[in-house]
Image: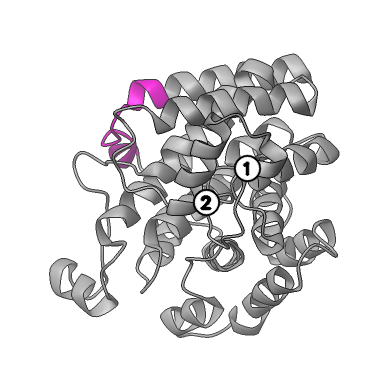
Amino acid sequence: MNEQQQARAIIYGLALGDALGWPIEFLSVKKVNIIYGPDGIKSPPDPAQVSDETQTSLAIAEALIEAGEADIETIMAAVTRHLIAWSNSPENDRAPGHTVTEAIRTLEAGVHWRDSGGQGKGNGSAIRVAPIGFLYQHDPDKLREVAHATGIATHQNTASDAAAIAAAYLVKLALDGIPPDDYIEHTLAFTQGLSSEFDEAMQRVGHVIEWTDELGAITHIGSGWYGEEAVAMAAYCAIRHCDNFSRAVRRAVNIPGDSDSVGCITGGIVAAQLGLAAIPPDWIALLENLDYLTNVANRLAAKKEQLY
């Protein structure tokens, strides 16, 4: 699979995980089962509308396309511009989180990105980093630096910082062909010393990975509203259903929690694992703004080819 196919897989994958989860984000599992049947939501709606999870991922991708080869200050200047442009766009009508919204307003007021983030422990810094994991697959130090910087621009909490770095690193691991059973060990080594809360969330994956009750297992890990839980839950889905994109994202979203966030992170990781051919073509065809998603993926792939 070439870089363009990999980039398309990741962009489509995260968008589809987001689109599958967004219609049920605030519904209980009981309500979801009443509306969609006993197996929950099984395919994206038509059209498959995405939320701020995908929109902010695209903002990060655009910044990397613009400045991905540069120093961190130049990269973050581009990230700041693209996040502000998204925040002020009419496309920003998908109920973004308060922490992200306030941080971007702070950036727009001229505060430096190192000081703009709040102490909220949400998942907004982790949902948008898949393009970072793709672009810096072969440069883990740069991956860590950029994921950290983009993360603390909105979320200063150490657990959120670790989650953002880990979510990008999981995409790298998937692209590298690392066996999914080894994801937790590799990720904890990469984020060592950053956050005990993040470590504990990831360790819960190992506790439940063999449980036959998957809903019980994933809800034991968390609800997904916090960054460390969302990443750990996505890692669980990527390990548990490492051979099937559709099953992985269905498991990720049919939860009593932040469905679109866990779905988005899961979709990016599993798409990186399995490649473009593993994503149902009829799902891809449903995505809103598909031409733009494809364009972003193609340009991100071209940037990676320039770097390496």
* Residue 276 visible in rendering: no
Magenta stretch: includes residue 224: no
Considering depth in this image, is 188 or 224 the residue closer to the camera?
224
Considering depth in this image, is 57 or 301 the residue closer to the camera?
57
264 lies above or below 196: above
Mark 2 residue type: Gly
SS for callout 1: helix
Label 2 and label 1: CA atoms lie apart by 14 Å
Q: Residue at x 45, y 44 (%)?
A: 101
Q: Residue at x 27, y 59 (%)?
A: 42
In the rendered image, which quarter is residue 133 located in? Answer: top right
What's the mark number on residue 51?
none
Q: Residue at x 60, y 78 (%)?
A: 209
Residue 189 is left or right of residue 148, and the answer is right
69 lies above or below 24: above
Considering depth in this image, is 119 or 170 the residue closer to the camera?
119
Percent x, y of residue 110: 60, 29
Percent x, y of residue 236: 57, 68
Instruction: Read off the residue under disc 2.
Output: 124
- Region rendered in magenta: 281-293
Count of numbered circles on the image: 2
Quadrant position of the N terminus in the picture: top right
Instruction: Read off the residue under disc 1.
Output: 116
Quadrant position of the C terminus in the picture: top right
Badge 1: residue crowd in 10 Å (few <14, some 14–19, many ≥20)? many
**Mark 2 or mark 1, earlier in chain:** 1
Residue 196 is left or right of residue 237, and the answer is right
Colour scheme of the rendered structure: one colour
Q: Residue at x 65, y 74 (%)?
A: 201
140 lies above or below 250: above
- Whether the residues at callouts 2 and 1 have beta carbons within 8 Å, the answer is no
Mark 1 residue type: Ser
